[in-house]
Amino acid sequence: MEEYENFSDLTKKERENIDFRVSVTCRDSSSTVVLAPHGGGIEPGTSEIAREIAGDDFSFADFAGIKSSGNARLHLTSTNFDEPRCLKLVHAASEVLAIHGEESARPVVFLGGKDHELGARIGATLIAAGFTVQTHQDPELQGVAAYNICNRGRTGAGVQLELSRGLRALFFENLKAAGRKNPTSELPRFASAIRQALHERERLASSREKRQFLERSERAPAK
C-alpha cells in the first residue's frame, strides 16, 4: 500500500524542501521531457540519471525525496503521480521519458510505456551500447496504463524505463546520497545512448511536421 494517495495528500504531512524537493526545467526548443517521479532517496539514482539524459537540451522534471531516511513513504504510484509542476511540463510535451528504479540485482533495463516506436529506438541504441534490455514480467511495471505519468503527454503515449538496482549501481560510487555525487563513466555512456534515440525522434517529428505543412499548403485553394 502507498502511504499517500496523491500529491495533495502527501503535502498534508510532508514539507517541501525539507522532506521532498521538486525541480523542473523547461527547454522551449525541445518537445521532450525526461522525468524522475521517484527521485532522490525514493528510487536512488533516478534523479541523477534523468538529469544526465536531459542535459541542456531536453526538459527535465524531478520529484525527489530528501529525508535522511524513510524516503520510500514519499513514493506516489505512477498512475497517481500528479505533482502540479511536473504534470504541467509533461502535459506540454510530445515525448515523455520516465526513469524509475527497480530492485533486481542483475544490470538490466526494463523497457515499457505505450510509445512503442520511441521505445524501440531507445532499446536499439541501448543494446548497441552493450546494455541488456527486457520487458518486465510484472504487468504493473510495464508502464502501459493510460494514467501512468509517462503516457500523459500530448500524444497519450510515452516511454518508461525501469532500471534495476544492479544497473544503477554501475553508474555511481554507490547508491547512497554521497556516493551518487561521484558518477562513473558508465552514466554518461548510458545517457548518450538514450539521448541519441531522443534526438532521432525529434528530428523525425520535425521532418514529419514540415512535410504535413507543405502538403496542407499545396492543397489550399489559391486566392
Image (tube, rainbow, N blue to C red):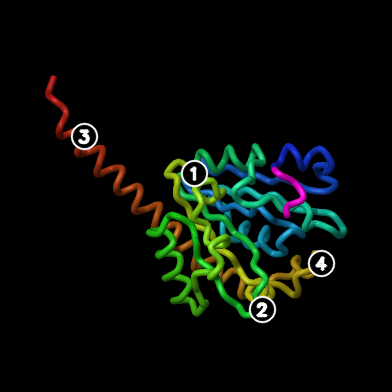
Identified at 73% across, 55% down, the residue is: 1
10 Å neighbourhood of mark 4: few (<14), some, or many (≥20)?
few
| Residue at 74 percent of width and 75 percent of height | 173
| Mark before the other along the chain sequence, 1 or 4 | 1
Q: Which mark is residue 153?
A: 1
Question: Which element carries disc 2, helix, strand or loop?
Answer: loop
**Upstream in sequence: badge 2 or badge 3:** 2
- The mark nearer the N terminus, 1 or 2, is 2
Quick check: marks 3 and 1 in contact, CB under 8 Å? no
The residue at the point 77 percent across, 58 percent down is: 72
Q: Given the image, on which type of amino acid does mark 2 rest?
A: Ala
Left or right: 130 with respect to 100? left
Tag 2–tag 3 contact (CB < 8 Å): no
Residue 42 colored magenta? no
Q: Position of residue 95 (x, y in %)?
A: 46, 49
Image depth: mark 2 or mark 3 in front: 2
**Of the residues under marks 2 and 4, which one precedes in the sequence?**
2
Front in this rendered view, residue 103 or 184: 103
Picture quarter containing residue 219?
top left
Q: CA distance from mark 2 to mark 4?
A: 21 Å
Which residue, given by chain and number where applicable, does mark 4 sit on? 178
- Comparing marks 1 and 4, which lies closer to the viewer? 1
Instruction: Assign the C terminus to one quadrant of the image.
Output: top left
| Highlighted range, magenta | 1-5
Q: CA distance from mark 3 to mark 4?
A: 55 Å
Instruction: Name which residue type carries label 3.
Output: Arg
Q: CA distance from mark 2 to mark 3?
A: 52 Å
- Spot the residue most to the left: 222
**Which element type, helix, strand or loop, lies under badge 4?**
loop
Q: Which residue is mark 2?
A: 105
